[in-house]
Image (cartoon, grey):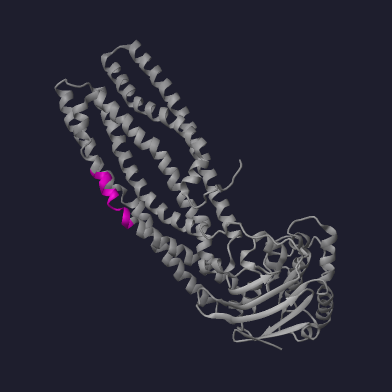
Amino acid sequence: MYFTSPQQKQELKSYIKQIRMPLLLSGLGGLPYNCLSALVPIIQGWCIDQVLSGSYDDVVYAVIILAAVTIAYQFFRFFKRYSVRVMANRLSANLRYSLMEALFHTKNDELELKGSGDVLNTCVKDVDLLVEAIRKTVTEIWDTWVLMLAYLAALAMLDWKLTLLGCIPLPFAILCANAMKKKVMAKNELAVKANSEASVKLKKTLDELTFARMSGCEELNLEALREAFQKQGDTNGLASFMKNGLAPIYLGIASLSVVVVVGLGSLKVVNRGMSVGALLSMISLMGTLAQRSTVASKVFNVQQGAIASWHNISALLEREQDGSGESLSAPVNTLELAHVSYMYPQARHTAFCDFNLKVTKPSLIGIRGAVGSGKSALARTLCGFYDYEGSYKINDCEVKALSEASKAALLKYMPHQLSCVNGTLCEVITWGSQRDNDYKESKRQACLDELNDDKEIGENGSQCSSGQQQRISLARVLYSDAEILILDDPFANVDHKTEIQLIEMIRELANRKIIFVFSHRPLIFDVCDQVIQLEGGECDEA
């Protein structure tokens, strides 16, 4: 099955249009299924009347009719359920596909502002809640509203006056559930927030587990995690109760309709105004009708929870970049920053301000500074990850105006920590491509000859030493062969001999590229064309 995202990704109706075929097929199965289901109790009552009349041939005939209707009913039931499941699976996949596209094209500072817990919760739980609500809504269109109409028609055929009297309690059950919509939605929003906080806390606890054990703070971390899970359990339990636990109240109100039918219908049977089979048929039909009315009420509550989930999904989809922008096809000659500043969106304080720099190709620029001086923020800004203030141009073209494809081709960033899924060394460095010659050269330049190509490096390089992780991250950047390289602390955790080899390689590479090196190690700055000192978010040429 083919999954894709619609053009209007922020509109729910666009996703509904994508599943119109299985939606139509569910109707082709749901309509006859529910119409036939209303016939089953009537035929059962007819069979009972034939038994009471003592007509053997009529009983056999009635049973054959009942068997045929039941088989047809179950066939259309299967057809409808299969179509609804296909619809739900495709909708879920398309929503997740759109969210992944949005994440791939969203700037880093916007993702950091959103928070990893919210993103994870949206991509998994919110999508599941929304799809389940749509599935239930579509299902209940056939299994509740069409069924209720079919059952009402069948009841009216048996006795329309008794049907009217019996249906009086049903609207009260629906109105009662509808009155709880706002409260249900509020509790669902609290549950979504608690799920996000628990996801963030779990990830943080797992990331810090080894260091917490070494420092004897493991119990403190676990206690904070227990509190987050306790809050998650309490809020989710209350939200679940609001959605499902009130059903007995609604059912109790709706079941008064069965009491009316049993009471008044029995008097009619005594007075020979109705047959026993007809009364049993009406009781069966009215009981199902009462039960389905409470299901309809529950669907109202599920829909309110889905509204909160869609708000989270659409908010993340709105962060997607439109993919437009200028294309920079000419070779890079100059790079200029004029009065560039960046402020952290959450902390609301400046990482660095009024940064000015003009570079011509080729150049090797060294940037140093104490911890917290804004080096990493500047490195990510140079890559176009962060939404800076001021002017940042490559070949007189503003980086903000460049398309995502152009920025990805021109600028490559080496973070100070390796981030990757588990795979072989070759797969991680090449991102799964097959340019073997380029790979071998990148591996050699990054001084990774001691590692086999097929070595499993583990998630985030967990099967490698810290120095190897840094060099694998460096090899990835070298493999890209971009014209502008931004290297964040490439010499961390490597020995002196390897550091000298890497410096020689970077100096040679800088003869045809623009390379920025952020480091604490002094040796690299001896071979740089220009050295910038960052202090408290401000820069000076060293």
Horizontal relation, residue 143 to residue 372: left or right: left
Horizontal relation, residue 278 to residue 121: left or right: left
The quarter of the rendered structure image containing the N terminus is: top right
The quarter of the rendered structure image containing the C terminus is: bottom right
Disc count in the image?
A: 0
Say above or below: 107 vs 302: below
Extreme-bottom residue of the structure: 542
Q: Is any atom of residue 214 visible in this view?
A: yes
Location of residue 95 in the rendering, given as x and y in whole percent from the top left corner: 53, 50
Location of residue 282 in the rendering, given as x and y in whole percent from the top left corner: 26, 28
From which residue to which does the magenta span run?
172-183
Extreme-left residue of the structure: 271
Location of residue 450 in the rendering, given as x and y in whole percent from the top left corner: 84, 70
Say above or below: 498 vs 406: below
Q: Is any atom of residue 238 visible in this view?
A: no
Say above or below: 224 vs 68: below
What is the quadrant of residue 464 in the picture? bottom right
Horizontal relation, residue 445 to residue 295: left or right: right
Q: Nearer the viewer, residue 117 or 54?
A: 117
Predominant SS along the magenta part: helix
What is the quadrant of residue 367 in the picture? bottom right
